[in-house]
Image (tube, rainbow, N blue to C red):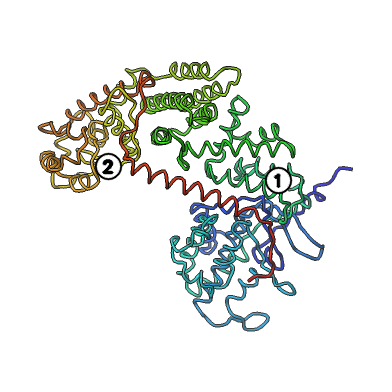
Amino acid sequence: MALTAEDRFKAESLTITELFQNAIYEVPAFQRDYSWTKEECADLWSDIKNLVDGEVKAHFIGPMVVIRQGEKNQKKYLVIDGQQRLTTIQMIISLLRDHWVQLDPGRRETQAGPMPYEDTCKSLLVSGPPAYSITFIPNWHIRDTFLDYVQREISDEKRKTLVRISDVSSKDMEYAEELFKAYLFFREKISVLTKSQTEKFEDLLLNDVLILRIDAVEIDNAFILFDTLNNRGLDLTQGDLVKNLIFQSMKEPVTTNLSPAMIKILTDWDNVAEKVSYKKLDSFLRYFLILKLGKKIQKESISKDIEAEYGNQVKIKQFIQEVSDYSDLYALIERTDSFQGQYKIQLNALFDDLNDLDQATQAVFLLAALKRFTNWETKEHFEKLSKVCRGAEVLSFRWLITGKNAQDLENIWREAGIKLMDQTKDDQKVLEATLNHLKQNLPTDQEFRTELAGRALKSSKFVRYILRKIENSRIDNVVWVLAGPDKLDVEHIAPKTPDDSHDWRRVMLGDSSYRSIIYRLGNQTLLTKSLNRSEKNNEFKDKKDRYLKNTGHLTELTKEVLTASSWSHASVVKRSELLAKEAVALWNWNALEKEIKVTAATPKEQKKRTVKKVAKKRTVKKVAKKRTPKISIQRGRH
């Protein structure tokens, strides 16, 4: 006989008081970490403030999905969906309790007699007799941190010293940066409330904020409901759904005391998510699937595609291993990790340049390149990898300058990446086919030159990349010259914000507006930070005099500017056209045949940079080790 809706789900609309009174909620191990940003916190605060201001009579904060555990007379629930809201509400209740203690208003009359004002909030943070247990146990990564900084009473030493984010130890911050940001946000809001305001705020929060608690009874029902809510607009990422898929595939009961095998799987998955960052996890998974399956993948279908490809216990382990390997490569692309080996200087500089372009969708192609030519410590693979990456840089830069359709470029990257993954052809044939595909889609020299000369370029990072590449190409035009990070600023010769000391707006009159002409490439150059700050609003002849006294700190591009007798709208137009002509030769397909060389960073700087990257990588390894102990929950710690 088919189960009825009542057999599958039991739903109750509850106030915050009813939600936490004599109940315990626990977030199981497969849930992600706390991730609310300032935007979500501000939205919730605004909604509660609307209650306080009388603009609304009640506020509904949405549904939560739980599974009831233990005996029938126990109210103990595992939280399948809603942990972000529960964590935040518990945080606000804790802050109200602390604020009452600081206000020290004495006692208030209750049905049980005079009681301290903070006792109302305390009763929702710790369940009553006989257990006296904490009513909410968050994600296992932040459990101790949440207890120390939020749930414990204000006398705790860690709480006394917490004034700003920088006061938090790196150990406590490890998985809880967003948690601390939210805590400080709400603490600042609550700390200014008077006694009467606090009393009103508490009453409305606890009695007029409503939540729908849905008891799914069994785990299978919970996941059905979880997917249904997601399909109807609940803000769940594909990464969240994949994590739930992993848990289902392991076929373990939903408890916090997981088997060692399950803990390892979840730990490996969390390491992947941390390595690529939660914000970019969905994009990374889509790129992974494109290369794995050799076809176009829609963001909305990621979890379904993974389920179709890996949907059983044996294959889910294979999925974790494969996606972990790709996450290591993705970290190199995102520059959160660095290359090692004999070609590390060249590869790190090359990928720094690619990263400076901020062209996100090239990542699917770069992943394929790193996967195909994975033995980059050998000369053969290093040369092939560097060639396809230089091809990617030329295409990305020309495409960005000419403003062509971004979706078309993503399609080019996807098709090129799939070509690189073709295992039926040898490396050389794959390389030739891939480069030919990229070259066919290259914007023409004329398009590129015209757009670069006439565009307003407002991103200092982007302009620094362009000028640095031109500067370094002049050193030796028979090689592909790369440069690591430098300490040069982008200087606008006619300043962005001129003051009354010189009438730059009159000097720069011409066919284009002042706001347009100052961002042309021809009006920008590279200077040391100190020179840039001191001279930004001075007229051109004064800038020339000061710059010429510091010739040892000037780039070739800046020295070239100083040969001009004056600076005007026509000067910018002419210089923009000359630099654009030079750029056509530099970002050119013929450049792929040049020797690769790094000149900008000194050996000492390279050594310092490499040590820093290695240190970060070792930290990740320590984190992975830390995440694997058996989970045990100690009740009643408060």
* Amino acid on which the number 1 mark rests in the picture: Phe
Picture layout, residue 488 above or below residue 296: below
The tag earlier along the polypeptide, 2 or 1, is 1
Of 356 and 236, the residue lying toward us? 356
Across and down, in percent, residue 380 comes to 47, 24
* Amino acid on which the number 2 mark rests in the picture: Asp
* Quadrant for the N terminus in the image: top right
Of 309 and 221, the residue lying toward us? 309
Between the C-alphas of marks 2 and 1, the distance is 49 Å
Of 597 and 121, the residue lying toward us? 597
Q: Residues within 10 Å of mark 1 (few under 14, many from 20)?
A: many
Question: Mark 1 — residue?
Answer: 247
Across and down, in percent, residue 151 comes to 59, 67
The residue positioned 56% from the left and 32% from the top of the image is: 287
The residue positioned 60% from the left and 24% from the top of the image is: 295
Across and down, in percent, residue 357 comes to 39, 33
Question: Mark 2 — residue?
Answer: 489
Of 523 and 584, the residue lying toward us? 584
Q: Residues within 10 Å of mark 2 (few under 14, many from 20)?
A: some
Task: Describe residue 189's horizontal placement relative to residue 466 as left or right.
Answer: right
Picture layout, residue 254 above or below residue 412: below
Callout 2 secondary element: strand
Picture layout, residue 558 above or below residue 294: below
Picture layout, residue 412 above or below residue 1: above
Task: Describe residue 262's horizontal placement relative to residue 71 as left or right.
Answer: left
